[in-house]
Structures are given as structure tokens and as C-alpha cells.
Amino acid sequence: MHFAPLPYLDPGSGSMIIQIAIAVLLGLGVALRASWGGIKKYFGVKPKPEEEDNDSGDA
């Protein structure tokens, strides 16, 4: 008779897996934010021109 043990995750392993998943998501967010300008440039999105302030004392 052959007995196969059931897979088991102890609370420490489960906690580590959750921490790794959160770290991966946060790391992807930081990488996306750091390269956002390059992503927009790749898709051809041009930056909006800055509006000039005409209240420079001409009145």
C-alpha cells in the first residue's frame, strides 16, 4: 500500500508567499512609474505644452 502525503503549507510559508506577492506588485508599480515617460514616448503621446502665465505685470 502506497501512501502519498498531502501538500502542506505552514503559516510561515504562507506569510512569506503573501509578502513576496506584495513585494512583486509594489516593485512593478515602482518600475512602471520610473519608466512612465518612456512608455508614453513609445506609444507616441506627446507632452502638453505648458500654459504661459500672462499676469507678469503688464497691466
Image (cartoon, rainbow, N blue to C red):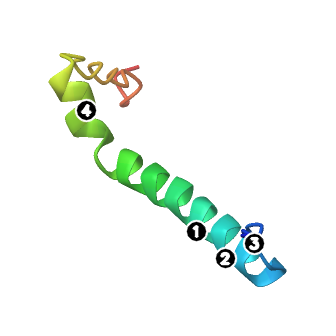
Residue receiving disc 4: 39
Residue type pointed to by label 1 = Ile
Asked where in the image residue 38 lies, by quadrant, the reply is top left
How far apart, in angstroms, are the residues tagged by discs 2 and 1?
A: 6 Å
Residue receiving disc 2: 16
Q: Nearer the viewer, mark 2 or mark 4?
A: 2
Does dot 3 land on a helix, a strand or a loop? loop
Query: Is 46 on the left-hand or right-hand side of 10?
Result: left
Of label 2 and label 3, which has the lower sequence position? 3
Does dot 4 land on a helix, a strand or a loop? helix
> Percent from the top left, x then y, of residue 54?
36, 21
> Percent from the top left, x then y, of residue 45?
24, 17
Residue type pointed to by label 2 = Met
Residue type pointed to by label 4 = Ile
Q: Residue at x 34, y 22 (%)?
A: 58
Q: Residue furthest bottom?
A: 12
Q: Residue at x 41, y 19 (%)?
A: 59
Residue receiving disc 1: 20
How far apart, in angstroms, are the residues tagged by discs 2 and 4?
A: 32 Å
- Res. 5 mark: 3
CB within 8 Å, label 2 to label 3: no
Count of marks overlaid on the render: 4
